[in-house]
Amino acid sequence: MKHLIDPMDLSVQEIDHMLHLADDIIAHKEKYREVCRYKKLATLFFEPSTRTRLSFEAAMLELGGSVLGFSSADSSSSAKGESVSDTVQVVSGYADIIAMRHPKEGAPHVAARRSMVPVINAGDGGHNHPTQTLTDLMTIYREKGRLDNMTIGLCGDLKFGRTVHSIIKAMSRYENIHFVMISPEELRLPEYIIKDVFEKKQISYKEVRTMEEVMPELDILYMTRVQRERFFNEADYIRLKDSFILDTYKLKRAKQDLCIMHPLPRVNEIDIKVDDDPRACYFKQTLYGKYIRMALIMTLLGVSADED
Ligand code: NCD
């Protein structure tokens, strides 16, 4: 049985297979309408979510399956003190696959050990978010037509932003990728990622303190919000929250085929005027997220459209 806890749990070949499956789902939606009939997805969300939870649920419903679950820790027995492993042990008797988000790093890993069905990490604290990464890879692949040979700027809260940590791991496996880290000193990428990914694999990266100085180099600009819920004090958040704001003026020096991404939610790090720029891909990105999650659910459940 396969779980998805860390983006590296999937090989490049498996990711490739899922991207092609998602392409086929987009092109032939009707073929997939019943493939998960009688299958149930449980969404266990101990932390808030809009896109991740709803795209998982929409994905399962579009495959003909059904969904159950909860959307906050308060509405589960976690509020009574139940452990994650007990909750998962119980729910894995009620569902065929589980998507789980938790504020504690490593919680989905603990869950996977006790589960009788596949567990998908839908975000664990400031650690990883592998299904956002699949969404991001799908967006890059669909918008740029490739996953190699590009310069990727990652901007904002690189310290607490789990989507950043996961996309770096995943993209570092493709040829000729250059990373540009754009953040205030206090929100720099954690040292362990610099060591374990960039240095170990000898991947080209640089750290800068302004967007403007690197804008013309970028093929992808991945914006992120400052992760308020992971700060220890509000004053630090207020001081750092507006460190980087992308606006139409800053985009003047960007490439014509730049792809602007954001896992969303946006707070105010992208001016809404940018939404009308054809290079803004962040709303398309949310839709790709549904299709790649359909491909992921099918893959982990071992179902295919060709069987019936
Ligand atoms: C991200 C997350 O939850 O980490 N959102 C998402 O899943 N689309 C990014 C964020 O919350 O800033």
Image (cartoon, rainbow, N blue to C red):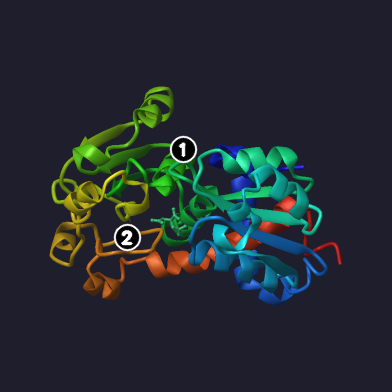
The C terminus appears in which quarter of the rendering? bottom right
Badge 2 element: strand
The correct choice, above or below, for 123 with respect to 250 in the image is above
Q: Residue 185's quadrant in the figure?
A: top left
* Beta carbon at label 1 within 8 Å of ligand 1: no
C-alpha span from label 1 to label 2: 19 Å
Reading the image, the residue beneath label 2 is: 260
Q: Position of residue 43 (x, y in %)?
A: 64, 60
Does the rendering let one see residue 228? Answer: yes
Reading the image, the residue beneath label 1 is: 169
Q: Residues within 10 Å of mark 2 (few under 14, many from 20)?
A: many
Q: Amino acid at mark 2?
A: Ile
Marks 1 & 2, CB-CB < 8 Å contact = no
Badge 1 element: helix
Mark earlier in primary sequence (1, 2):
1
Q: Residue at x 53, y 52 (%)?
A: 134
Q: Position of residue 213 (x, y in %)?
A: 14, 46
Q: Position of residue 52 (x, y in %)?
A: 53, 61
Does the rendering let one see residue 221? Answer: no
